[in-house]
Amino acid sequence: MSSLPLDIASALNTLSRGCEGIDTVMKTNKEENRFSRALEALQRLSMDTEMPIAIVGGLAAIRYGYPAATQDIDIAVCQVHLEQLIQLAPQYGFKIAWESKAGWHTLMHGDVEINIVPEGGKARDSSPTRIPSPRDMGVLQGVQYASIESWVELKISSGRQKDRAHIVEVLKKSDDKSIAEIDRHLANVDLTYQSAFKNLVAEAIEERHQEQNRR
């Protein structure tokens, strides 16, 4: 049997990795995989050091209803724990792939990339707000998912079209109560975020209606 062309083989590998992320979050497959092993190592580090860690990014998108084929793990860490994280991470099986003066470190656990989102940083230079601490995201201990309100805040602050698309997909499956809670949260953070969110809600409603009409 002939082997697959490299571009197709690469695409299948990417899809397989994305499915592992979905399995890990949704617990649709009880077998361990590279994502679950990385999260277990983070959990041990977090509990041993009393360092709260908030899961953000693609894994949180999966948690809130959109099965994003993510290839890495994004975690928010308190400013006061950034140096400690770098010092202790190797003891828990992590390699330091990149150490940033601004705290945007990158760890590797096997071949899983873990991107650090530091409290006090900015998702983009022009962002009107700074990244909140894991505690402000609703994570008081251990490794847990950031609240949906905080996740949306981070996604909007990035200014990336990809992140806007993730929000829309999640909103298409969200109820009115959740949407109202996110709206109130963003009103207290930044009014431009709230305005952007209202546009995304309208986009999600329109897409949902179109999809329903095609059935």
Image: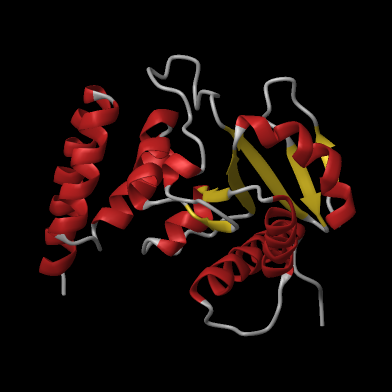
Q: Nearer the viewer, residue 130 or 24?
A: 130
- At 29% from the left and 49% from the top, the residue drawn is 168
In the figure, residue 211 lies in which quadrant? bottom left
**Disc count in the image?**
0
Query: Measured from the top left, where is residue 190 in percent x and y?
Result: 27, 24
Which residue is rendered at x = 24% and y = 45% of the image?
Answer: 182
Between 55 and 69, the residue placed more toward the observer is 55
Q: Quadrant of the C terminus?
A: bottom left
Q: Of 45 and 93, which appears nearest the observer?
A: 45
Q: Quadrant of the N terminus?
A: bottom right
- Would you place residue 140 above or below residue 14 in this image? above
x and y, in percent, of residue 157 in the image: 40, 29
Q: How is the image coloured?
A: secondary structure
In the shown orientation, is residue 61 left or right of residue 108? left
Instruction: Please indicate whether residue 192 sits to the left or right of residue 112 in the image.
Output: left
Q: Is residue 107 visible?
A: yes
- Note whether residue 196 is visible: no
Q: Is residue 7 left or right of residue 27?
A: right
Q: Position of residue 115 (x, y in %)?
A: 66, 42
Return the x and y of residue 87 as percentages of the image width and height: 85, 39
Which residue occupies 76% across, 59% down?
6
* Residue farthest top in this picture: 126
- Toward which corner of the image does residue 174 lie, by quadrant? bottom left
**Left or right of 9, for residue 200:** left
